Amino acid sequence: MTTKLDEKKSKLQFDIPNELFTTVAVMVCNIISNIFDDIIAYDKLSEVSFWSVDIDSRNTRRGVADEIYDTIVFNKTNFVRQIKSESEKICRQTVRELKEMSTTINDFKRSMGHTEQKTFVNEWKKRDVSKGMGILKTHPSVLMHLAGTRDGVDVVKVFLSGDDKKEAEINLREHYPEVPFEFVDVDTGYDEIITNIKQIEEFEQSLPEIDNEARQKVNTVINRHAEQVFANHSGVIGIEMSNVRSDNNRMINELCIVLFCLDESIRPYGESPLPKNLEGYPCDIRKEFVMFGHYVDCQTLNIGSSIGIPFVKLAGSVGFFVRSNDSSEGFSKCGFLTAAHVAIEQWEELYEHRSLLSKDPLANTSHEIVYPSYLDNRTNVVIGRVIESYSGNWTNGTGIDAAFVETSQRNLGEEIHLPDENSLQFNGSILVKKRGRTTGDTIGKLVNDCLHVRVYSTTVHGRYYEFEKCFAVKQKDETTFFDEGDSGSGVFLIDKDNSLKPLGIAFALFRSQTAVCKIRQITDAFNVSVYGYEEPMDLS
């Protein structure tokens, strides 16, 4: 026997999308529940009646179902009105949300578009102007060039240094007479810039130091925008903070972000104008070149170069140039190796954790590297960040104190194969060479491959750090092989044909010898390969 509700069920056809079904069902249930007081009262009455009623019997439940149906029919008008009202509210809210979404999408489309797309594409094509200029690479005096427009006029500015500057200028003009070259001798043509830098530094030193809270805020802004600024503006070679802003040849005491540029008057092809501010902090645009001022007469990063952590008065050395063997992101990350205690400010925590940086909570912190080190120069120009590091004894008990610093460098040379450690001798007959920040190029003798090192902490009394199975190198003559500031420098084995093969990273100093962690353990742990370099690493 069917109930009245069963008879009407087949006629109640609703075409409700799955996405809205739950919302509509909840709404309808809430409305219906408000009109069922009489039904509930009937059920409660049956429990206290003077005669016995089986509320679970089929007849009783059928009566309840019929009562529900009759109640709904009786309240049909009110019921439909409430459902309609609630449905309209849902629809109006949906329309508002769709309009907001549409506005957001259209704004994004406009921001991604370019008002002069054809001009934009043509400008980007001009960026390839140097690809056909092989002569730019044949002259060692040609450091770099900048191609763009100045006041709407095309210009290619070439930076020269060295003995064959004049020859390079003549050859370029002869081979490419149609190119509007502009040459600058960085050895003599930047006296005005150097004078300006000195004046700014003198004014900065006369002012109170930037307090730590303000420094941290500006550093956060710089860190957040530096990658984008460098990516969007090829003429920017450095970013830092300052409490002095230049304004029409006047110097103002104002906290600002300094953008060091090769030539602020040239807008490189395909690029937008330099930012006037970053998150409210004004940008002070200063002409600079990597061989002067903030780079201490050095425009390239090489093996042995001084590197360090921003605002930390310590210095180490660049070891080996390496490339990651992992290309899962579509390219292999490149950079250099140095010592962990040079590159990671919290390296002691990393040591205690016995973990690779990439698998450690410290990976959530950005570990930036500056060149030159803050100890040697206060510019704090960030040239890379640590993406892998380890300090301690690796799984096979071999000591590692190393860090992989990723940079934008891609023009590495050929892979350098590692020597066979089983064929090494430790009687002093094998010579090694290293290049470090402090002692430069030095020659030493390989005397051991199982040196155990314990280095006591200079910050926590009684704490020490052990590194096992290290190479040991002694100086060849009276010349000091390794000194403070050389940590992280690469030690090369001098082969029989005088070729150099990577041996390890120098990281600790005894009075009698130098401790070197083995390169093969580092490359295996970090999954990298050691490379030479065809050209100096360009930081711009």
Image (cartoon, rainbow, N blue to C red):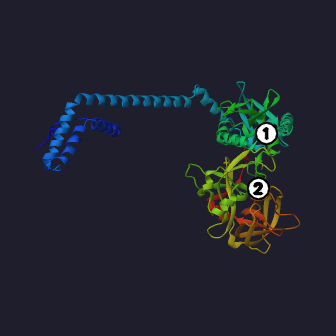
Return the residue at label 2.
317
With respect to residue 171, does 335 lie above or below?
Answer: below
- Total labels: the figure holds 2
Q: Residues within 10 Å of mark 1 (few under 14, many from 20)?
A: many
Q: Could one spot residue 415 in this view of the protein? A: no
* Element on which disc 2 rests: strand
Q: Could one spot residue 348 in this view of the protein? A: yes
Q: Earlier in the sequence, mark 2 or mark 1?
A: 1
Return the residue at label 1.
289
Compared across the picture, whether 90 is left or right of 65 comes to right
> What distance separates the C-alpha of mark 2 from that of mark 1?
22 Å
* Element on which disc 1 rests: loop
Tag 2 and tag 1, C-beta contact below 8 Å? no
Q: Nearer the viewer, residue 446 or 78?
A: 78
Q: Nearer the viewer, residue 330 or 60?
A: 60
Label 2 is placed on what type of residue?
Ser
